[in-house]
Image (cartoon, rainbow, N blue to C red):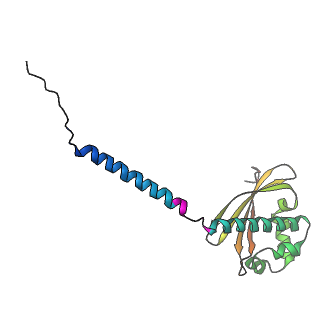
């Protein structure tokens, strides 16, 4: 009968030292990484983005309020220079608002949803609830003018009414 030999793995004395060295290097690297993250200052862009969002929300509040109170001149002043050139007069703008954005005239409430920055445009989504209780998504496209003030570039009113499609 052949004799069975067991395989015995012989570790040299240097192997445990190698493992301990690798573990200590890993711990040191992790400690340095966490320390670097803790010392990194909070970027100012976060504060600036928050200020921008506050300014955008304020602009939309003023625009919706101007429309609800039937103040065509105020609503016209809050749109971008490109929009003002496109419409020409507050009366022309008001006609477009009356025809295509009836929800802004007659809504019960609205709340701000998420927003996205695309190049120099800010897209602000608004959940607007109409007089009939129907929820609609209104999308405001905003752009900063030469004075770095936010202006409304475009408004898109979507409808949840399946009969329109």
Spot occupied by residue 1 in the image (x, y as percentages of width and height): 7, 18
Residue 1 magenta: no
Q: Residue at x 79, y 51 (%)?
A: 135
Spot occupied by residue 78 in the image (x, y as percentages of width and height): 80, 74
What segment carries the magenta color?
37-43
Furthest residue toward top:
1
Decide which of 89, 14 is in the foreground and name it: 14
Relative to 153, is 97 on the left or the right? right
Q: Residue at x 72, y 65 (%)?
A: 53
Decide which of 113, 164 is in the foreground and name it: 113
Q: Residue at x 46, y 58 (%)?
A: 33
Quarter where residue 58 is shown: bottom right
Spot occupied by residue 157 in the image (x, y as percentages of width and height): 76, 60
Relative to 96, is 27 on the left or the right? left
Decide which of 35, 61 is in the foreground and name it: 35
Q: Residue at x 86, y 50 (%)?
A: 132
């Amino acid at each position: 009968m052949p004799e069975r030999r067991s395989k015995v793995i012989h570790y040299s004395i240097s192997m445990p030292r190698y493992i301990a060295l690798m573990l200590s290097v890993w711990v040191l690297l992790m400690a340095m990484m966490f320390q670097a993250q803790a010392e990194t200052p909070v970027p100012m862009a976060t504060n600036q983005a928050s200020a921008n969002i506050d300014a955008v929300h304020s602009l939309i509040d003023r625009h919706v309020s101007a429309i609800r109170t039937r103040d065509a001149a105020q609503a016209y002043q809050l749109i971008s220079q490109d929009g003002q050139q496109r419409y020409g007069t507050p009366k022309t703008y008001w006609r477009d608002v009356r025809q295509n954005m009836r929800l802004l005239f007659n809504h019960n409430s609205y709340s701000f949803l998420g927003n996205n920055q695309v190049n120099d445009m800010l897209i602000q989504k608004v959940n607007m609830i109409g007089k009939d209780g129907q929820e609609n998504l209104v999308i405001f496209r905003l752009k900063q003018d030469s004075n770095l003030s936010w202006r409304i570039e475009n408004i898109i009113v979507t409808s949840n009414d399946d009969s329109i499609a």
